[in-house]
Amino acid sequence: MTRVLVMTAVLAALALAGPIGCGKRGQLEPPAGKPSTYPRSYPAN
């Protein structure tokens, strides 16, 4: 019984950690008052 509860908790944690930990937060915006420098050619001087 304890093994089933532990496995359920571990699987639930892994299922929730996937979407939360991906890091995508939307479109990137330059800081206020700064021009956008992306995309740019390499190397940037």
Image: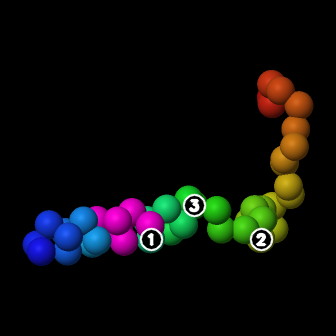
Q: Please name which of the two marks, 1 or 2, marks the residue nearer to the observer.
A: 1
Instruction: Kindly identify which numbered label has been placed on residue 32.
Output: 2
Q: CA distance from mark 1 to mark 2?
A: 34 Å
Q: Nearer the viewer, mark 3 or mark 1?
A: 1
Horizontal side of residue 11 vs 6, given as left or right: right
Q: In the picture, which quadrant includes the N terminus?
A: bottom left
Which corner quadrant of the image does residue 40 belong to?
A: top right
Mark 2: which amino acid? Ala
Q: Position of residue 44 (x, y in %)?
A: 80, 30
Instruction: Answer left or right for 19 relative to 12.
Output: right
Mark 1, other Cα within 10 Å: few <14 / some 14–19 / many ≥20: few
Q: Image quadrant for the C terminus? A: top right
Tell me the residue that label 3 is attached to.
Answer: 23
Vertically, is 21 above or below 39?
A: below
Identify the residue at image location x=87%, y=43%: 39
Asked whether, in this view, residue 41 is left or right of residue 19, the answer is right
Q: Main secondary structure of the magenta part?
A: helix
CA gap between label 2 and label 3 equals: 22 Å
Front in this rendered view, residue 26 or 28 = 26
x 44%, y 71%: residue: 16
Give the percent coordinates (x, y) of residue 34. Answer: 81, 61
* Boundaries of the magenta span: 10-15
Q: Where residue 24 sits: x, y (%)?
A: 64, 62
Q: Amino acid at mark 3?
A: Gly
Q: Mark 1 belongs to which amino acid?
A: Leu
Asked if the residues shown at circle 2 and circle 3 are in contact, with their CB atoms under 8 angstroms apart, the answer is: no
